[in-house]
Amino acid sequence: MRRDFVMRSAAVLHRFGLLLALVVWLGSGAPAFAQTDPLPSWNEGPAKKAIVEFVQATTDKASPKYVSPEARIATFDQDGTLWVSHPMYTQVLYCLERVPAVVARKPELRNVEPFKTVLSGNREAMAKLSMRELEKILAVTLTGMTVDEFNAEARKWLETAKHPRWNRPYTELVYQPMLEVMRLFRANGYKTYFVTGGGQDFVRVYSEQVYGIPPEQVVGSAGATQFGYDKAGKPILTKVPKLLLMDDKAGKPEGIHLVIGRRPVAAFGNSVGDKEMLEYTQAGDGARLMLLVHHDDGTREFAYGPKSKVGTFPDALMAQAKKQGWVVISMKNDWKRIFAFE
Amino acid sequence: MRRDFVMRSAAVLHRFGLLLALVVWLGSGAPAFAQTDPLPSWNEGPAKKAIVEFVQATTDKASPKYVSPEARIATFDQDGTLWVSHPMYTQVLYCLERVPAVVARKPELRNVEPFKTVLSGNREAMAKLSMRELEKILAVTLTGMTVDEFNAEARKWLETAKHPRWNRPYTELVYQPMLEVMRLFRANGYKTYFVTGGGQDFVRVYSEQVYGIPPEQVVGSAGATQFGYDKAGKPILTKVPKLLLMDDKAGKPEGIHLVIGRRPVAAFGNSVGDKEMLEYTQAGDGARLMLLVHHDDGTREFAYGPKSKVGTFPDALMAQAKKQGWVVISMKNDWKRIFAFE
């Protein structure tokens, strides 16, 4: 539509015989970021430089690094890359907090593990739940309802739940410097995509409002749905406990292929779960940009690395980043501020 | 980028103090299709009228049928809706014609059914292959290679294979009236998507070039891929025989949810395989448009209906279309011409 609008506008200007030269001059004008700093929340340094130079080069037709508009795909991990994921992934908290409502509907789960532990509210015991037990919790809290019901439940929770440290909604705990990066990419013709281990349906509830990313540009862990009809004969989609895509590690390039069908030219992550996505991005031809957010700011956010269960950043990943020319973003040194509310 | 360009252009025009009024006038100007006939290959009639009026109404802010730009999703079945699918689906022909190459690589299949029958070239025997046997053929011809290898093979075949009746490449046997519909929708801010029973990877090979639909807007039957590394250590994605999505019938709304994550406002199909997609589209709020292409032109293309195995259009579907207000497009009466080369 925009293209059409521009073309029609140009045609009318031409017909008016007035401003063709101006339009031509505009068309070849300076890139969007030349006028003001496109990344005001970033300190000057190698990370900011790498991002700005990459966007400039890949959108400059005279550059050997030029990337044609249709190939401009940038992918972003979410947890720990775009918003806070400590002490626990937001969606896991959602699932844990949904347990009482599920048990109210299915009382037979009340005295069964792992639901019993979750209902006890004993955080220490909850922290010890195994991956298998967590999966049981995810299954009953993320499936068994229609897509519309799930969306309404998740939306309601997101409006009221608050992070214990900042006492703010989770959707405010997004990294302002990364929002600026996403905007810079989009302003230069890039399609920005989530490629997250989080649930595709969960992230879609707020992706557009919080990040400017529409639902169709959210690649995430995805369960199957089942088409059917409700009692009134209305078509519905029900979320069923069958995993189609675990969008983590090797699942990230697999998910990118499934939903996007092209290789990104830029990819942002923060942990070992993003390694394969960055490798896959780098393996393409032409200009490439791979980045990892490093949580090294215990004062303003969190400092964690190889030993953290959530958002693990092993030493081997750091070594690989150095060897392969991936940019490591230091939250402490590269980010002037972390959140918009600061 | 376009939006940004328009915004920057507008800012400069304003600064020049010259043409703000003109720009405002352009912004509220007549829709793209008012100037010339947007559907020149269509005869005047209820189908053309329904399409043009729907696009006008849903993009007119003053209309109660207005649809906000981000919700403008139109989905299109492919086989029989956008290109010829008789006497057999193009992709099935591709798979059958790939069998010799596969057997050359795996000689142990030479005397095993169904490969033996396919190698015999006996079309009558091939027509009798069961769905189970066809699936075996699809599995060995569509999986077991990297995504890049598959793309190269499919591209090569599409460049050389020809439809027996028209002696032209399959990619020329697209319906010109439908290309015009897709362009009309896109010119008015709609995202056009394939939602096809055909293989997602197969369709992506030519979707952009032939239909102007980028790979990320192709929803189709999809197999899993597996991330790994080749002998040189380069990351690769290998197509594996595990079906993630059978994008037909109930699979269509399920696939739409998986890849797009929003309900379309307009949907085009041609057979019983599109019924659920049209029902799902209609079940949303606000303006809706559901259409079925009816193959009733045995002279210029094919005439088939309830009895055809390929692209079945049962009487019950016709009755449902009438009852629910779906538009049935008569190829014979509604289309001035079928192909661009006519």
Image (cartoon, coloured by chain):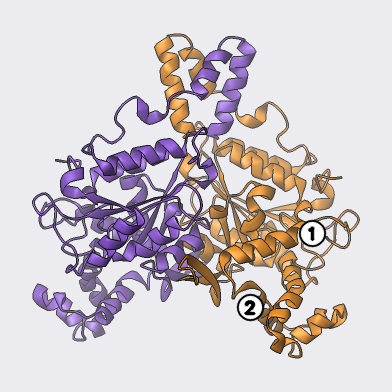
Chain colours: A purple, B orange
> Residue B44: which quarter of the image?
top right
- The quarter of the image holding the C terminus of chain B is top right
Q: Position of residue A121 (x, y in %)?
A: 11, 73
The residue under label 2 is which amino acid type? Ala
State the residue at coordinates (11%, 52%).
Answer: A167
Q: Tell me the crowding category of disc 1: few under 14, some 14 to 19, or many 20 or more residues within 10 angstroms, Cα based.
A: few
Residue A258 pos. (x, y %)? 50, 63
Residue plotted at (61% across, 66% down):
B149
Q: List the single residue furthest toward the right.
A: B299
Which image quarter: residue B218? bottom right
Residue in the foreground of this view, choosing between B327 and A248:
A248
Q: Does mark 2 fall on the same chain as mark 1?
A: yes
Q: Please tell me whether mark 1 sits on a helix, a strand or a loop.
A: helix
Which numbered circle lies on residue B160? Answer: 1
B69, above or below B222, in the image: above
Q: Is residue B267 above or below residue B102?
A: above
- Count of number-bearing discs: 2
Q: Amino acid at mark 1?
A: Thr
Given residues A224 and B243, the one toward you in this image is: B243
Mark 1, mark 2: which one is toward the viewer?
1
Are the residues at dot 1 and dot 2 in contact (C-beta closer than 8 Å)? no
Residue assigned mark 2: B139
Q: Chain of mark 2?
A: B
Bin the neighbour count of mark 2 within 10 Å (Cα to Cα): few under 14, some 14-19, many 20 and up: some
Q: x, y percentage for residue A211? A: 33, 46
